[in-house]
Image: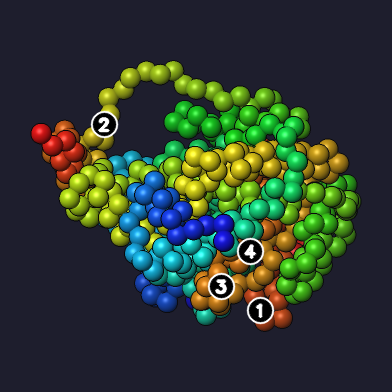
Amino acid sequence: MKISREDVTRVAELAHLELAEAEVESLQRELDSILTYMEKLGQLDTSKVEPLAQVLFEVPAEGQPSQEITLREDVPAACAVAGEMLAGAPDPSPPYFRVPKVIDR
Amino acid sequence: MSSAAPWTVQSVRAALEGRKISARELTTEFYARIENRNPGLNAFLTLCPKRAYAQADRLDATIARKETLPRLAGVPMGIKDVISTRGVRTTCGSRILENYIPPYDACAVERLERTGAILLGKTNCDEFAMGSSNENSAYGPVRNPIAPDRVPGGSSGGSAAAVAAGLAVAALGTDTGGSIRQPGALCGIPAMMPSYGRVSRYGLIAFASSLDRIGPFTNSVRDTAAVLAVIAGRDPNDSTSAAAPVPDYMAEIEKPVKDLRIGIPREYFAGGMDPAVRNKVETGIQLLKTLGCQLVELHMPHTDYAISTYYIIATAEASSNLARYDGVRYGLRVPGATLIDMYKKTRGRGFGAEVKRRIMLGTYALSAGYYDAYYLKAQKVRALIARDFREAFTRVDAIITPTSPVPAFRLGERTADPLQMYLADIYTVTGSLAGVPGISVPCGKTPEGLPVGLQILAPLFAEARVLQLAYSFEKAGGYAV
């Protein structure tokens, strides 16, 4: 097995996911089978390959101008939807979102 | 369903201009169809009649004033429920967003409505667009209108089923690894994934940001071109939306395809394909040859690594994008003793099994000690897959493959083994990783009467060529090969 039960609970902790006992078991089995299948990537020598995060950073396509990412000017603007966003929140306390107590003193 | 030919962008416009029907009557007609068939199909999750009739009345007023109608005037549309619609519930097929009402419209939605389209409602989909069968929706599966015991494909299954069943003239879907093209193939209608960056993702609720694309489902390639022409183009609200000019697709599709070089990658015709699908796709390719296309055999050596690469990159990005569902700002909150406890309980209860599986896989691939072996490795193999396409497109103008290795399968038939479900995306994830545009067009039916899809891929931003080939194929009778 590539994946232990501890791996599953450790990753669930990182992902902030509460899992039922049955879910831990099935995820261990399923992730193991998926990751075992993915081992085939190890067959490829990629030591001289640059990683590709996003295709628009690639060389331009046939007959096309360069597709540089263009960022707009960073101009502050009023957020017109704050009221609506807060109205849809689980526990709003305008202009804040209320959450359980984080700091004890 | 009526036996008449389906409504199209063109026929809707002609009927409105000729006063054969008003926009309000047309809207009523489509809501009647939905009322009649949606209980069986489950294609629509939320309807927005107020918004639809308001738009219809605006169009009818325009007609009464004898003014020119906008390009998509009166076209009744469905919008996949991962695309934001102001004031209209948008669930992403998830319990965690069961009551979420976006405060703004996605760019594509805004452009469609501004151009006269009538938004009927939101279409069902796999939860957060994760799935290939629409069985991962928290609101129940969609049924395939061609064969109701079978899936419509996924993740945009509701959009595909709605258009195929005549409950909408067009619909928007999203494609991250095949989620437009595959349901288009399984439901027997044209379905297009534009280039990455061609259509703004502003307002598209993110699954995998380097892969997600919005595109149309329609009943004809001419309509695909008409809808794409409206939603394509630079949007300052999406930094990855491309500034490349948008050609006149309606004119481009008329160009002849004679002498275009069509690549047939041999890796896509290896094992694992249903024999009936193979038969139809090979017949479809011969039809393109009779239209004067030159067939070129291709070798795309990294094809076999695409599923692994895709499922690492897509899940890694998803695990990051879905971190925002924590019970604080929107959607479900399950109370907990501490903040972290509230996060865990909210996410544990709010997400379905497939979403949890992908968050876990993505979190694992990004976690300390595994990042280089999985995520970085996958990004490097992605570069090799993109290179396969770049090299292929120095020799050919377009690439033809099957869309899906199998026709529509039965509900429940493939849910037991997630890996088997992932492997069914084999022909679509490659184009997703390479960023290129692609369409699935109907290419005959299996002896059981199930639709087969032919996939046409072209270089980045060469949507016009994809549409041109698809249109010629359609006109030459390709849908019934």
Q: Which residue is mark 2?
A: A80
| In the rendered image, residues at marks 4 and 2 fall on the same chain | no
Q: Are marks 2 and 3 in contact (CB under 8 Å)?
A: no
Which is closer to the viewer, label 4 or label 2? 4
Distance of label 1 from label 4 (alpha carbons)? 20 Å
Q: Are marks 3 and 4 in contact (CB under 8 Å)?
A: yes
Distance of label 2 from label 3 (alpha carbons)? 45 Å
Which element is circle 3 on? loop
Q: Are marks 4 and 2 in contact (CB under 8 Å)?
A: no
Mark 4 surroundings within 10 Å by alpha-carbon count, few (fewer than 14), some (14 through 19), many (20 or more) = many
Distance of label 1 from label 3 (alpha carbons)? 20 Å
Label of residue B414 in the image: 3
Which is closer to the viewer, label 2 or label 3? 3
Chain of residue at mark 3? B
Which element is circle 4 on? loop
Quarter of the figure with residue B81: bottom left
Left or right of B434, for residue B300 = right
Q: Amino acid at mark 3?
A: Arg
Label of residue B449 in the image: 1
Chain of residue at mark 4? B
Mark 3 surroundings within 10 Å by alpha-carbon count, few (fewer than 14), some (14 through 19), many (20 or more) = some
